[in-house]
Image (cartoon, rainbow, N blue to C red):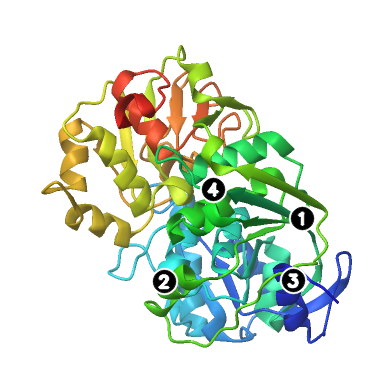
Amino acid sequence: MAMTVTEKILAAHAGKESVKPGDNIWVDVDVLMTHDVCGPGTINIFKEHFGQDAKVWDKEKVVIIPDHYVFTSDPHANRNIDILREFVKEQSLPYYYDVGTENYKGVCHIALAQEGHNRPGEVLFGTDSHTTTSGAFGMFSAGIGNTDAAFILGTGKLWVKVPESMRFEFTGTFPPYIMAKDILLQVIGDISVDGATYRTMEWAGDAVYKFPMEERMTLCNMAIEAGGKNAVIEADDVTLDYVKQRTDKPYKIHHSDADAHYYYKKTYKADDMEPIVAKPHSPDNKAVVTECRDVKLDRSYIGSCTGGKLTDFIAAAKLLKGKKVKIDTFIVPATREVEQDLHTVKMNGQTLADIFKESGALMGEPSCAACLGGPKDTFGRANSTEVVISTTNRNFPGRMGSKQSQVYLASPYTAAASALTGRITDPREFLN
């Protein structure tokens, strides 16, 4: 029976030769990730149903990464970290990346990749909707709620309905001013925020395979903004080069069959892509950047799991180097590794960090920061009535702080170009 890559991974983890969309199956879980927002709730449900002294099914497969509300004086946020620490100590969990220590990493979705927890062919669940990011490694990776996570903690299994697959293929080559974020916003705008509800978004085509891993991660990151269950890109040499540098654990690569059935297929010409923004207040409210050139901005925000990777900052630095920003501009690396890279990676003899500082940008600690609004002392949090251009993944009212603020989603190129002019700006104005 012909299957997609997602169907093959789920079949293998259910001990079956084949599965089809709509099948309900028990799958064995390779990795469970949780963080400071959902971890305490998950732990509470686990203890309530499995017992106060219950042990997790496999401590080598549990990864806990505080990242959302970590640099704050808020007592409720701090209490969440305390609960994680107590649980990790009780369970002797080896993969806990605690804030305030040398082991702190930053945003969970990027840290999972950097620490070798993403491996082709595996099943990873996380208590965060952007867990779909890990699908860039040719694995099944999806967000779940606290109850499902607690069940996995106790059993290592989850009851899953096999999703239908949608395939988005890009032929040719993306122009140099196009980033993965532009492609995402184009596709989500085309199919809407519920166009992929409980479906797999499979990314394919020559143009996609020319992307480095970090851009592939961006592509998979926002599947949930289209309602997707998961996103996936088949593993290739680029994937394996990245993975082998970070783990020596075994894995298995799966590929979609040529005659596999898809619920939906669409082919795009990569060469025709334009820089895109998503206007307030929905990720599918797309517009070509040139249509928004009259929108005046109060701030530019470059960071998050979607736009806070080294690739994103190299793009931003290309535009900001030797220039001054006209509006408040925030640079927030996703992880400590990215932060360290900002101080070592050079562009024409100058570190990325120095380029940003000389441009007048403000730099924050590696974390989710303003992407989820956060407590009032969160770095980069939007204030009332501010108009923001951001590399984050959501622009709902209040998402970055104030409910009165307006957020335009964009690529790092567009966010950087706009920082230089104080209005939404096509990056080609500076890249050319």
Give the mark nearest the N terminus, 1 or 2: 1
Q: Do the residues labelled 2 and 4 touch (CB within 8 Å)?
A: no
Depicted 361 relative to depicted 143: above or below:
above
Q: At 87% from the left edge and 71% from the top edge, which residue is drawn?
A: 24
- Give the image location of residue 207, x and y in percent: 53, 52
Tell me: 211 left or right of 262. left
In the rendered image, which quarter is residue 32 located in? Answer: bottom right
Q: Which of marks 3 and 4 is in front?
A: 4
Give the residue pinned by disc 4: 172
Residue 90 in view here: yes
Q: Give the distance between the C-alpha atoms of the residues marked 1 and 2, in whole angstroms.
A: 27 Å
In percent of the image, x 22 and y 39: which residue is there?
A: 356
Tag 1's secondary structure? Answer: strand
Q: In which quarter of the image is the N terminus?
A: bottom right
**Residue at 58%, 55% in the rendered image:** 220
Whichever of callouts 2 and 3 sits on the residue coming sooner in the sequence is 2
How far is the residue under mark 2 from the one under mark 3?
Answer: 25 Å
Can residue 192 be seen here? The reply is no
Q: Mark 2 points at which residue?
A: 242
Q: Name the residue under label 3.
A: 257
The type of residue carrying mark 4 is Gly
Which dot, 1 or 2, sits closer to the camera?
A: 2
* Image disc number at residue 418: none
